[in-house]
Each structure stands twice: as C-alpha cells, then as structure tokens.
Amino acid sequence: MSVLVYTESDKGKFKKNAFEVASYAYKVAQDLGTTVTAVTINAEDEASLGNYGVSKVLKVSNGDLDTFNAKAYAHVLAQAAETEGAKVIVVSSSADAKFLAPILSAKLNAGYTPNVVAAPDSTSPFVVKRTAFSNKGFAHTEISSDTKLIGVSNNAYGVHENTESAAVEDFAPSLGDGDFTTKSVEVDKVVGKATIADADIVVSGGRGLKGPENWGMIEELADVLGAATACSKPVSDLGWRPHGEHVGQTGKPVASNLYIAVGISGAIQHLAGVSASKTKVVINNDPEAPFFKAADYGIVGDAFEVVPELIEKLKEFKAQNT
Amino acid sequence: MKILVCISNVPDTTSKINFTEGDTKFDTNGVQFVINPNDEFGLTRAMWFKEKQGAAVHVATVGGAQTEPTIRKALAIGADEAIRINAEPTDGFFVARQLAEVVKNGGYDLIIAGRESIDYNGGMVPGILATLLDMNFVNTCISLEVDGNSATAIREIDGGKETISTSLPLVIGGQKGLVAESDLRIPNMRGIMMARKKALNVVEPVDAPQPTQDQKFEKPAAKGPVKLVDAGNVGELVNLLHTEAKVI
C-alpha cells in the first residue's frame, strides 16, 4: 500500500526532480498513513533518497535500460506498483516522465493528473491542484480511480528533507522483446549546460535583439548566472534560434526561480508559458511592453547597453560572493 | 497508408481565461475556438503524407456539435473525412477510449495527435490510446518520416532531441517541428467549399470510465506592480535579486 515514486537519474546520478518527487510522495504517504517506495533504474547512491523521505528502494539494474525507453520503463513501474500494492504513483514532469506516464496510466487503469503544483487538497476524495489552460489557470481535479498517477510540476512543491532510512532491495522486472519496439538511434543533447527544464535560472531573448548575431551577450549573461538560454516564438519561427529554445504556450514551459526576458514584449502566449517562474525580470526599451505588467523587476532601456552592464555587475557580484 | 489525426477544439492562444458557475466551468463567452496548435502541426504533416505518399487522412474529435466549425476547418485544410464522437471531452482516459474505438473500426496505420491540448494540458490521450491498442508510441515528436512499414521519429527531450526507429502501426504526440510555423495552411475558398461536401460522421460514445473530474478552477493570484530599476543603475538590479528576491 506504499506510495510509489519514480526517481529519475541520468548516467547514474539522480536528477534534481528525483528529490522533489520523493519529497512530494512523502507528503502524500504521510497524509495516507503509509510509507514511500522509490523505483530507481541504473542509478547510484540509492540510499540517499532516504534524505527525502523514501524508506524503501526497488533498485533495477539492467543494461537494456541504459537508454530511456518509455514503454519498457512504464512496464518496470507497472510491475513495481503491483509488487508493492501501490495505489498512488508519483512521477515528475520531465519529457521522459510525460512520455511514460500515459502508458503507465493505461496499463494500471489509473487516473492521471499531470502538472500538479501542490500537496493534495485532500486524500479522501483525492483532489490535487494542477495548472490548466497553459498556466493561465489552475484546476482542482479529483482522481476517483482506485489507482492514481500524479505528475508533479518542476520546481513547484519543492525539495524537502525528511530523514528516513532507505532499505535498498534489488528488483528484477520481467521484460520482453515487446517492450522494446521503439529503439533509440541517436541522442543529441547538450552536455554540461543547464536545460530549460531543470535550470534554476533561464535567460531569454526576443525580437528586440534584432538578429541571431546578437545572441552572444545572451549566452554570456546565461554563462555568468549558470543559466539556460531560451527565446520567444518569433525568434524561433525566424530561425534565429533552435525550436528547442522556444518557451511559451506552444513551446516549452518555464518554471525556474529566475527568468530574465531581454527584448521580449510579452505576448499573452509567452507570459502564460513562463508564468510558473518565481521571479521575472524584463529588460525592454518600450515602457508599454505588456511584460512589465507581469514582471517583478524591470529596466526600461536599450538591451545593448543594459545587458553588457548587467554582465559586468554580475561578475563583480560573483567575485565578491564566492 | 491510412492516417487518423486527432483534433482538439480549444480556445485560441490569445484568449483570456475566465471561469463561470462558481468557478466550476470554463467560460466560453466571447472565446474563439481553433484547432489545437499541436494538432494543427500534425494535421499539416499528414497533408504532406497525403500529397507525397498518397495517404488517406481522416480527422476525429471528441466533442459536441459546437466543435463542428473546427472540424470543418480541418476538412478545408485537406483532410478527406471527419468523425465526431458526440461526448464532452472531460477526461483524457475517456477521450482515448473513444478514439480507440474509431481506430479499431477504421483500420488506421498512423495516428497523429498533439502532445497536449492547450486548454486542459492533460498530455495523455496519445499515450493511452497507443497502449490500449498495443501500438508503438512516440511523444513530443518534432519530425516523422514513414517508409513502408518503418518509421523514423525525432522527439524533443530535456536539453536536446532523440531519434527513434520504430514501425507502424504508430501513434505520435506531435508538436511544432513536425512542420514549421510557416508551413501551416490557411484554408482557401476552394478548400472551404469542398469541406462542405466531405463526410462528417457523428458517432455516439462507448461506455468508458472517467477517472478524473475537474471540480473547481481558479485564476493565478493578481500580481503586484513591477519594481523598475533605472537603466543607469543596473547594479541595483543585482542587489535586489540577491537581497530581496534571493534568487542569485
């Protein structure tokens, strides 16, 4: 009857969202009077999950699962849920989690609510708060099926330390050829840089930058802050930046601690996509830009003067504070 | 190849969102409805398969009669036939069950859905549909090529992309990238005229559970005014981000 949580790892190391989903699962388990069991796939240092409230780890070690495969991973989690008799399963909002969760939902006949931003409103009935209308609103959604699957939004519930002692058990799910009918041929991924999905800070540029040749200062600003780079929809449509950087309603959502928008006017679709960011800064030469109404801090000024100055001031700040 | 494109009827991306009936319903008053953008990229890619590879393209939606203008638009863009399952799409599992019936009866090889609808953002219909039908599935798909029975798809992952090799029958959750924004088609007069003559078959839903129910909605809390920093005093911004917002 434990709450089951899938704690993701990348090349053996837990992702940041692993600790957030574990923290969330612990809260649900407390509400339900039970404990948390985590599933890890080819991860290291499983016992560290105890620091986030996990009391048991089902450790899967299987070379066939070195590369993510949604169907196979969903099958692993379905078997783990069955073994544990779990009625509540918690996953993250990563691209991988959003790929496997619907498969798992169908396998377990589990009602699934993604984009959950807070601890359950109640557990009987089981009601969770999630974003809807592409972050323009929230829904309080009841999951009435016997088994429930919750996708937790990034950087919303947060990471909470809860000291438990995690007992690690080997778990060997049974997988067959039918689980591997989609094959990963090539993964093309930035290494050693923050991604929009898990960065604490995102620096984003819009049409106000006038052309792709001016992106050097956006990248430098991002480097100084250890931030990921992003862009507005027109910029990706113009081909100035890759589609993967487009944030907004039809692009990627951003839920960083700090979002800095340079030369982005703030169309309603863009504002929706970045609204989950906790602190928003806008730099724009047009004081009437709608983004100023949605931002916490703003500078009305020429980006080509303000951004280099900001980079200098941040370098000074970093030099003093490290 | 026979393709089914699943369409959601959603508020236009510029819509302001309001709720009604004690915040239990989305207020459709004054809202313009459109083909869900993620679905429209998929529909446009399906048109490419029709024109280059002779595919037949059908569209399906789960929704009431009020969704028909959106379906007609899909026909005007070039889909051959449409199916409307006459039920309110209030739960993703329920919608997937309805579409599964359409796929079983229609013998489709490729099902193209959007990665999520931009209204309720469930993002689950394509994956549940694929699993119910034991078909292959690729989510957040930004490129799709089909050669005979083989398919090569590229999906967006956090921080990059992944190329996947698989086979038909296949379901994809698509998005921008399947075609570029500039490839999207505005129906012309001939398309609109032809769409009126194309079949729009209405079928009744099958019994299926609805494991989730939206009980209540709310809008984000109103935001305080922006704190403006003078362009000549950028250091003050750094100071505020450190001492007040505590984000650096």
Image (cartoon, coloured by chain):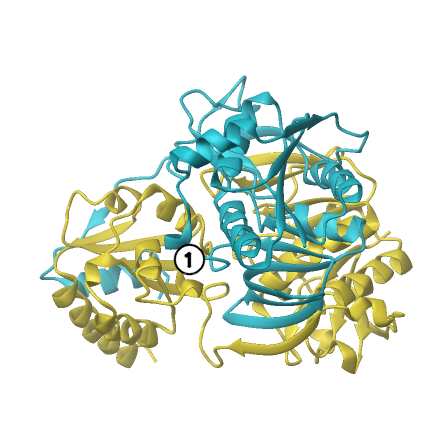
Chain colours: A yellow, B cyan
Which residue occupies the foreground of this view, A242 or B150? B150
Residue at 48%, 23% in the rendered image: B27
| Horizontal arrangement in the rendering, residue A268 relative to residue A124 (left or right) | left
| Quadrant where the C terminus of chain B is found in the figure | bottom left
List x then y, in percent, for residue B100.
76, 42
Q: Residue at x 89, y 56 (%)?
A: A82
Is disc 1 surrounded by few (<14), some (14 to 19) or many (20+) residues within 10 Å? some
Residue A160 in the image, given as x and y percentages of width and height: 60, 59
Report the front residue among A200 and A246.
A246
Residue at 85% from the left image edge and 72% from the top image edge: A177
Q: Compared to A211, does B115 lie above or below?
A: above
Q: Nearer the viewer, residue B43 or B39?
A: B43
Q: Nearer the viewer, residue A282 or A96?
A: A96
Give the labeled residue for mark 1.
B180
Chain containing mark 1: B
The relative height of residue B247 versus residue B71 in the rendered view (above or below) is: below
